[in-house]
Image (cartoon, helix red, strand yellow):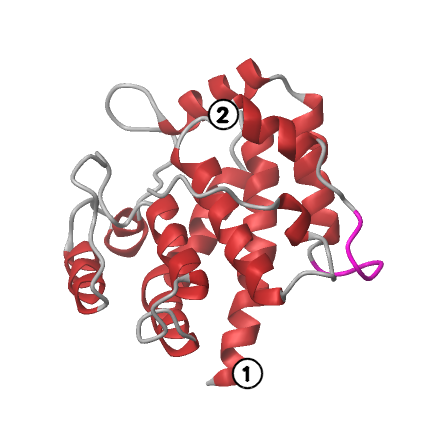
Amino acid sequence: MSSASVSLDAISSSQLDEETARADVYGLLAQLYYAPPAAELLAQLREAPTDAPAAGAFLESSWQALVASARELTDAQIHAEYDTLFGGIGKPEIYLYGSHYLSGFLNEKPLIKLRHDLAALGLGRDEQMPDTEDHIAYECEVMRYLIAGDDVAVANLTHQRQFYGDHLQPWVEPLCLALSSHPRARFYAALAAFTLAFMSVESQGFDILA
């Protein structure tokens, strides 16, 4: 996982490049899903602008709900919620791995294909990362790189559309619906709603390019 910072202002500002905003959303999602969010990130989220460039914009309400949830809950409550949903010993309440949603099992064929496609892009998992590459945070970080990376031979729209369609779009909705309906999810239910809205915009954009 990259520790690159993201600009929360970019998410709701029309003054910044759209691609920068997309990359920052993916970066934010990666950080929020990977681990209990750091105090600094939560502080930034609580202070983030909540008005979209155009009133009633598609992401506005879900973004406002996410920021509101961060403001209503303490750091400790959000950390405890993360541990309740995704942590613990044995089977978690909610899986964050694509293989679970695509095949019903962890470390199955979807992960093998993902690793093959990552290798073709010249990408791979950091040996220090304990999670497999089909973790939602890892895949969001890959998307962030494919949007904002400096190597245009890899970081380009064609690879974005291919990776998203093959490895993220097929399972992100079931994950978000599982989170949204979980009785103990508050902050992460709001995050799931924002994720689903953002991915819907991504899907529509890539469909136009197909």
Q: Is residue 179 above or below residue 162?
A: above
Q: Is residue 178 left or right of residue 25?
A: left
Q: Is residue 142 above or below residue 193?
A: below
Residue for point 53% across, 25% down? 184
Q: Is residue 191 above or below residue 149?
A: above
Residue at numbered disc 2: 38
Q: Main secondary structure of the magenta part?
A: loop
Residue for point 56% across, 26% down? 40
At numbered mark 1, what does the secondary structure look like: helix, strand or loop? helix
Residue for point 24% across, 38% down? 131
Check the image and name the residue furthest to the front: 150
Viewer-nearest of labels 2 and 1?
2
Residue at numbered disc 1: 208
> What's under tag 1, amino acid-wise?
Ile
Nearest to the observer: residue 9 or residue 66: 9
How many circles with numbers are drawn on the protein?
A: 2
Which percent across, then down, holds residue 169?
Answer: 42, 63
Labels 2 and 1: the sequence-earlier one: 2
Nearest to the observer: residue 199 or residue 40: 40
At numbered mark 2, what does the secondary structure look like: helix, strand or loop? loop
Residue range corresponding to the magenta coloring: 51-58
Check the image and name the residue furthest to the right: 55
Label 1 crowd (10 A; few <14 / some 14-19 / many >=20): few
- Marks 2/1: CA–CA distance: 37 Å
Which percent across, then down, holds residue 144?
Answer: 43, 57
Q: Is residue 56 left or right of residue 152?
A: right
Q: Is residue 165 left or right of residue 176?
A: left
